[in-house]
Image (cartoon, grey):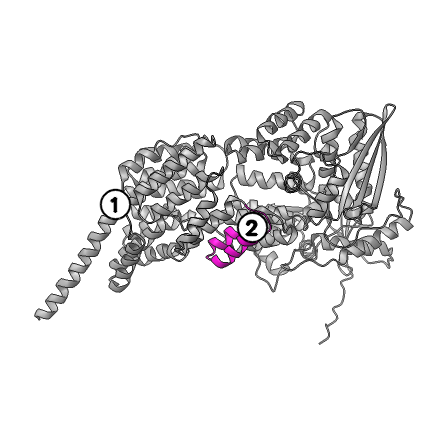
Amino acid sequence: MGRAMVPRESRIYVFGAFRIEPGARSLMRADEPVPLTPKAFDLLLYMVRNAGRLLTKEELLGAVWPDSIVEEGNLSQNVFLLRKALGETSKENRCILTIPGRGYQFAAPLASESPQLTVRAAHTQTTAIVEEEYFDEVPAKRRSRRWIWAGLAALAVMAGAGAIFYRSAQRPMPGGRREMVVADFVNRGKDPAFDPTLRRAVEIELGQSPYLSILPQPKVAETLRMMGRPADERLSEPVAREVCQRNSGQAVIAGEIVSVGSHYLVTLDALDCATGSAISQAKAEAVSKEDVLKSLDRVTRQVRRQLGESPHSIQQFDVPIYQATTKSFDALVAFSRGNAMLASRNVADAIPLFDRAIELDPKFALAYAARGRVLANLQEHKRAAEDYAKAFALSDGVSEREKLSITAHFYAFVDEDLERTADTYKVWARLYPRDAVSWTELAGTYILMGRYRESAAAAAEALKLDPSSVLAYQMLARAQKKSNLFEDAKATCREALVRGLDNWHFHSILFQIAYAEKDSAAMAREAAWDKGKTTENSTLENEAFAAATEGRIQRAHELFRAAAEASHRERLEDFPNELLLDEAQVELFAGFLPEARSEAERVPLDRDTYTLTEAGIVAALSGGTPYAAALIARLKNDPRHSVLRDRIYIPLLEGAVALYEKKPGEAVKLLEPAQVYELRDYIIPFLRGRAFLDAKSPERAVAEYRAIADNAGIDPLSPMYPLAYLGMARAYRLQGKRVESRAAYERFFEIWKDADANLPVLLEARREYAQKAEDRRQKSEARRRK
């Protein structure tokens, strides 16, 4: 049936330099179109039509998405895009005001005018099509490639209008994903500082584009290793082309710098990976060494245009390299060399180079962010958070992509706000739809939030964009395991291994699934894979928890000791402290409370907040409430903002203390805020189950314990899993449900059939079960006597 024709609105809205023409669905600034997604345009038009009025989030969601159920994050992301299009900053919002806790208001002075007959050049309309595809939502299926051809048409029109390119007759790249490899420059500039620096500068400059995807340095290094070459080998043009082909790329960006007297000539070529034929070339002259980066800006801008990117996209995503990085060339040299060290896995030598870059330019945001990432990987979370906070404070001038990365890490490590972290990665994915990083990081964030199906979907999107991403495969397999999709997770691991992406994480996931499925042969096979490797300590830790989950505590201690010895061989100094907490947890769940308390209170206080929270919970439940109370006071006195600390960690600690002090009703209330991430692991439903059980609310206790029992994939190696059945057995007994209670007890005994005989928890459970049996016998005897 044909679509009904709707009269177009004739009124034109004007505010500042902007004009909205609803009939044409266009936003103009100084007669130039401003790209907006359809939903962002609908949102802006609704706000303008209701200017000066407070618009609640509920009203806006209903107006812009009338037939859909969408998250509030969709609204905030579109507001972000509107503010960006209107040129507003995070510190100054003149048009769209946020009314905290209520909604938004359009506040700019508004005028209207009658329409005039306007004929626009064809390239203006074409450009609008190109830009709309950049910013529209990314659907589950592969995106349309329509914008690619429109972009090339727009460039042809511009060239005809007088835009001049060097070698403009070069053929454009074919449609598809633009995966680029940046080669090292041919340095004829008589200055060795150019060698690592110019390549890194080009990667940053081209990386701003949503149209291009630059192969990261770590993946380049990984590919070089697969080619049998050193990971830090200089990337000449022929080697770069092979790296490009192995990663299904389209082009190599090859540069050259030549000194001509006191001047420099900078040349940048885009070459077809397979044939080496030229796709584009640009040249620019620099009058001095200090002017080289500005020349690099000019040539990269030209190459972006020649590769088919629209002028409006380039204008919107084009921060000069000296602004995006540093005005100090020497600081950029140190930064570039630090990144090269990281790519070749030389972490120890990378940090001093980042230190040097920051010393030369204390306002170098990217250097702080890079050092923060290294420190986070080294588990130095406090120092990493300090660097991320500094990078965030200095991020106003960096490129949009780098700003999103810095912002996401700030929310993750400083504010510890997973919701805002996820929202930032969603915006990143919309602005840079070809970038797999945002989807991979979003998948990891969703795992931390216990949203495993969404994590799997995000990881799948990452793999569509980068089928060789080890981390995306890991996230997908982990999310599938935690969703109880064991066959899917095994298939994902096998696919990664077939692709040559073998590492410990896949074998750990397969080991956990094998344990959940009681496949002892598969467990042995996965454990054997790691013998003698640098990660053997972690596999032994897995085996220890598997033993503990079956109640074989003595065997668990033996395996923990073996893991400690393996860590000493690899000089992993922090790992024994992790094992200390592991053993404390095992002692607690077996019922050895004095031992659990002693070990928990030995965990060093310089550990990260999550580790200290775990130690405090173990200490509190085993009688160490003064230690837990001291931790609570310490966390509450920390002036830094942290969502996880305030909404999760402190409530967990306070709830554990209340449980030990026999205040179950208070514990229930204290644990209420933590429900938002109830299934990120077992501790939240476990504590809430015990609180409801002690409060004589058996129905609610069963629901909490059932959440654990029904989700074995979240953590198959957790001693809390079998104890959930014991908790259910006790809750059913309170309800008078004898059949269900007996079945839950027997399931617990089945899991602990090989448990050590002296475990206090096991002895107590057997007494309870025997008492139930005796009660049943006496009742039966009484009935017979009657």
Give coordinates of residue 470: x percent, y percent: 58, 47
Residue 163, quarter of the rendered image: top right
Query: Is 726 left, or right, of 243 in this rendering?
Result: left
| Mark positioned earlier in the residue sequence (2 or 1) | 2
Amino acid under disc 1: Leu
Query: Is 519 left, or right, of 467 in this rendering?
Result: left
Amino acid under disc 2: Leu
Real-space CA distance between mark 2 and mark 1, rounded to the nearest whole angstrom:
40 Å
In which quadrant is the N terminus drawn? bottom right
Q: Is residue 105 visible?
A: no
Q: Residue at x 75, y 71 (%)?
A: 5
Query: Is 311 left, or right, of 611 in this rendering?
Result: right
Give coordinates of residue 252: x percent, y percent: 76, 43
Closest to the observer: 164 or 654?
164
Name the residue at the bottom extreme. Answer: 1
Is residue 161 inside the magenta stretch? no
Residue interval drawn in magenta: 474-502
Give coordinates of residue 452: x percent, y percent: 50, 53
Disc 1 on helix, strand or loop? loop
- The residue at which mark 1 appears reads as 759
Front of the two marks 2 and 1: 2
Q: State yes or no: discs 2 and 1 in contact (Cβ < 8 Å).
A: no
Residue 773, quarter of the rendered image: bottom left
* Magenta highlight: main SS: helix
- The residue at which mark 2 appears reads as 497
Disc 2 on helix, strand or loop? helix
